[in-house]
Image (cartoon, rainbow, N blue to C red):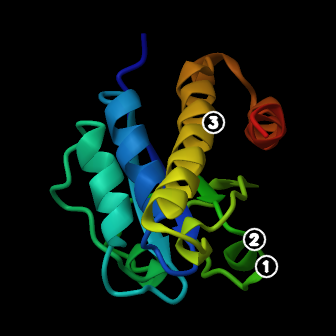
């Protein structure tokens, strides 16, 4: 068994909901094997309160979760990323910084829960739906036999995860 820890950066525009959820999910599900990070092209400056409520209700640690710019991860002193995954369509279409080390990339677009309209309960349902989708995708990611896959096969697996989980 490899002791290598894979760094994964989840990108979104605002870095207040989807990418934060993905970071928290990966850090819990992939503990000891993966390290999740998140960032945004135009960070909101704070994590959405419904995101924090959802994570807290599901017993996820909130320490260190913050809305931040993807520029932090393009600096020379930033951790080298193995994977960069976009979780919103807008960030996927933007020109991203050049990531040191040429990490593998894929688009895992999911609905923006921050844009949800309606009552508090209706909005919470959208947040929960996005959380479940990301939970499924991250479960598939952490179950991949990374040490046994060549780069092309791994890239194909990353893209297929989004298709398998809606």
Do we see residue 84 in this rendering? yes
Distance from the alpha carbon under mark 3 to that under mark 1: 21 Å
Residue 4 drawn at (x, y percent) = 39, 30
Residue at the spot 50% in from the left edge and 80% down from the top edge: 14
At mark 1, the secondary structure is helix
Q: Position of residue 47 (x, y in %)?
A: 33, 72
Residues under labels 2 and 3: Cα distance?
16 Å
Residue 100 can be seen in this image: no
Asked if the residue at tag 1 contacts the one at tag 3, i.e. Cβ–Cβ closer than 8 Å, the answer is no
Residue 89 image label: 2
Residue at the far left in the pictured view: 63
> Height in image: 55 above or below 58?
below
Q: Quadrant of the N terminus?
A: top left
Q: Earlier in the sequence, mark 3 or mark 1?
A: 1
Image point (42%, 40%), residue name:
26
Q: Residues within 10 Å of mark 1 (few under 14, many from 20)?
A: few
Measure the alpha-carbon separation of dots 2 and 1: 6 Å
In the picture as drawn, the residue positioned furthest to the front comes out as 119
* Residue at point 46%, 57% (across, down): 121
Residue contact between numbered discs 2 and 1, judged by CB atoms under 8 Å: yes
Q: Secondary structure at mark 2?
A: helix
Q: Dot 1 corresponds to which residue?
A: 93
User: At x 63% / y 56%, what residue is drawn?
Assistant: 85
Q: Depth-wise, is mark 2 or mark 1 nearer the camera?
A: 2
Foreground label between 3 and 1 = 3
What numbered label is drawn on residue 137? 3
In terms of secondary structure, where does tag 3 sit?
helix
């Amino acid at each position: 068994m490899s002791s290598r820890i894979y760094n994964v950066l989840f990108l979104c525009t605002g870095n207040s909901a989807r990418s934060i959820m993905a970071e928290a999910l990966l850090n819990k599900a992939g503990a000891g094997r993966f390290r999740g990070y998140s960032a945004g092209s135009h960070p909101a400056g704070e994590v959405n309160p419904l995101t924090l409520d959802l994570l807290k209700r599901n017993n996820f640690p909130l320490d260190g979760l913050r809305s931040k710019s993807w520029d932090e991860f393009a600096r020379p002193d930033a951790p080298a990323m193995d994977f960069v995954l976009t979780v919103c369509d807008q960030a996927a279409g933007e020109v991203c910084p050049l990531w040191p080390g040429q990490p593998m990339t894929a688009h895992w677009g999911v609905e923006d829960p921050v844009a949800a309209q309606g009552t508090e309960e209706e909005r919470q349902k959208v947040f929960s739906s996005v959380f479940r989708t990301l939970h499924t995708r991250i479960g598939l990611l952490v179950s991949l036999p990374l040490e046994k896959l060549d780069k092309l096969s791994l890239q194909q697996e990353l893209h297929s995860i989004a298709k398998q989980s809606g």
